[in-house]
Image: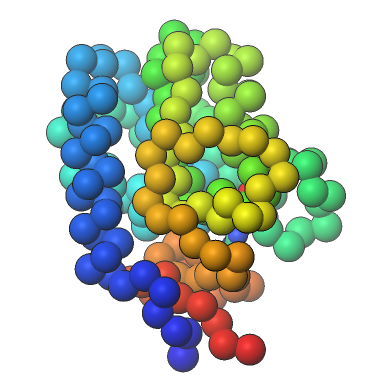
Amino acid sequence: MPQTLISSEELQQRIRELAAEIDRDYRNCENLICVGVLKGSVFFMVDLLKQLEIPLAVDFFQTSSYGSATEPGEVRIRKDLDLAVRGKHVLLIEDIVDTGFTLRTILDLLKFRGASSVKLCALLDKPSRRQIEVPIDYRGFAIEDKFVIGYGLDYDERYRNLPYIGVLEG
Ligand code: 5GP
């Protein structure tokens, strides 16, 4: 069994705090698109968005996954957005920022496409692993350099449905 790093209660409490901050910051915004990065961010995104009261649209990116043959720094877009972002405010929602390459690529792409603003909300941050700078506007938890699973995060497609963040032993 995985060891619990962040319990379900801690996750939900922190998500309520993040939602209150986001609601406050975007209260006058009429054209917000919340963009999730598949698949890992889905559990976090659903819980977060259910807490928000501001009007918003939802869309998804899918990038090449962790452990693929892709070189670090080369991020493939597997599924692109359905919505146009030009002139829209985008809140990117990600499960974890590790080296930063995935987010850097997506943030640059969204800006290139003419989004009015792009902010990042990440549940987990592994600052010691960062190789490229990525500003995190809303951060759930900073964690040590450990491979975590659960609450959307997988190991070989398993464990995504755990309601907590855990660490695999061994
Ligand atoms: P980055 O491009 O920042 O290095 O990597 C981001 C992606 O790597 C995340 O969206 C996630 O899919 C994967 N990743 C990074 N660290 C972990 C981890 O500790 N556990 C799992 N399951 N995936 C991770």
From the top left corner, tell me how far across and down residue 36 is, in percent: 45, 41
Task: Determine whether, in the image, residue 65 is placed left or right of residue 38.
Answer: right
Q: Quadrant of residue 5?
A: bottom left
Q: Is 152 situated above or below 121?
A: below
Provide residue 131's location: percent of width, then percent of height: 72, 45
Evaluate whether residue 20 shows in this view: yes
Residue 50 visible? The answer is no
Residue at 84% x, 50% y: name it. 71
Tell me which residue sits at (31%, 72%) in the image: 7
Q: Relative to 83, is 71 on the left or the right?
A: right
Colouring mode (rainbow / by chain / secondary structure / one colour): rainbow
| Percent x, y of residue 96 | 52, 53
Which quadrant of the render holds ligand 1?
Answer: bottom right
Quadrant of the rendered image containing residue 87: top left
Is 67 on the left or on the right of 141, as rendered? right
* Left or right of 19 in this view: 129: right
Residue 60: x percent and y percent? 48, 39
> Outermost residue toward the left?
53
